[in-house]
Image: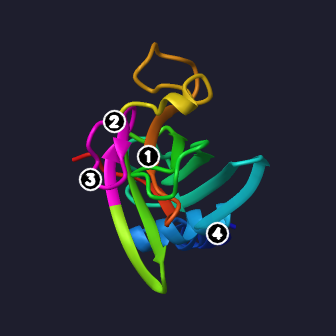
Amino acid sequence: MAGLLVAVISAAVAVAQLVEPSSPAEHVQECQHKYAAPYVRGREVAPGVVEKKFGSCSWPPVPGTGADGFSDVTVTEYAIPDVPMASKFTNAQQIESECTRLSLRYRFYSQGTVAQAPLDVDNDQIVSFYDGSPEAIPAELEGIIRDPRGPEEPGPKSLIVLSHDRYELVQAECVDPH
């Protein structure tokens, strides 16, 4: 009987070792399976307003991700009303997450040209997509989007990125702030 007990315990330990991820790649794979990540889900929530949700996994976890490395980033994109296409900015993206720092990837489309444009930026500010420099909320959007530099509000942190229609946000994820 003791031999059978030892065999059962040994088998249970062996199975537990197989189930527990041991490498960063295995941790990411387990997270991706659990959340069906990475994903991008989008929908129009009002005329001129589109919401996208980005889910991703990383290992080891970085500030703003769950203990399993999962991060969920919600982006609400607002068209800036009554601005000509030749303006520097034609839209504003309010990005909400628990991330301390975000990595954003944009795809540029114009006259048959397609290119990728990265932007890594800290949360809780308003910045230009072009270089990450500080900006102000366009007057046309005041009162519509929340200023992340204002009083602390409950809920996720917020980042506002001012950009142009020719740039589409295709990836948003938490990254290590160091």
Can residue 56 be seen in the rendering of this structure?
A: yes
Start-end of magenta stretch: 119-135
Q: Amino acid at mark 2?
A: Glu
Quarter of the image where one finds residue 161: top left
Binning the other alpha carbons within 10 Å of mark 2 as few (below 14), some (14 to 19) or many (20 upward) gives: some
Q: Inspect the image, locate mark 4, and give the three-letter code of the amino acid beneath it.
A: His
What SS does tag 2 mark? loop
First of labels 1, 3 by sequence position? 3
Give the distance between the C-alpha atoms of the residues marked 1 and 3, in whole angstroms: 11 Å
- Horizontally, is 122 left or right of 89 in the view? left
- Tell which of 59 and 2 is nearer to you: 59
The residue that mark 1 highlights is: 162
Image coords of residue 25 (percent x, y): 43, 73
Mark sitting on residue 131: 3
Residue ID at (44%, 61%): 58
The numbered mark, 2 or 4, whose residue comes first in the sequence reads 4
Asked if the stretch drawn in magenta spans residue 68, the answer is no
Q: Label for residue 33?
A: 4
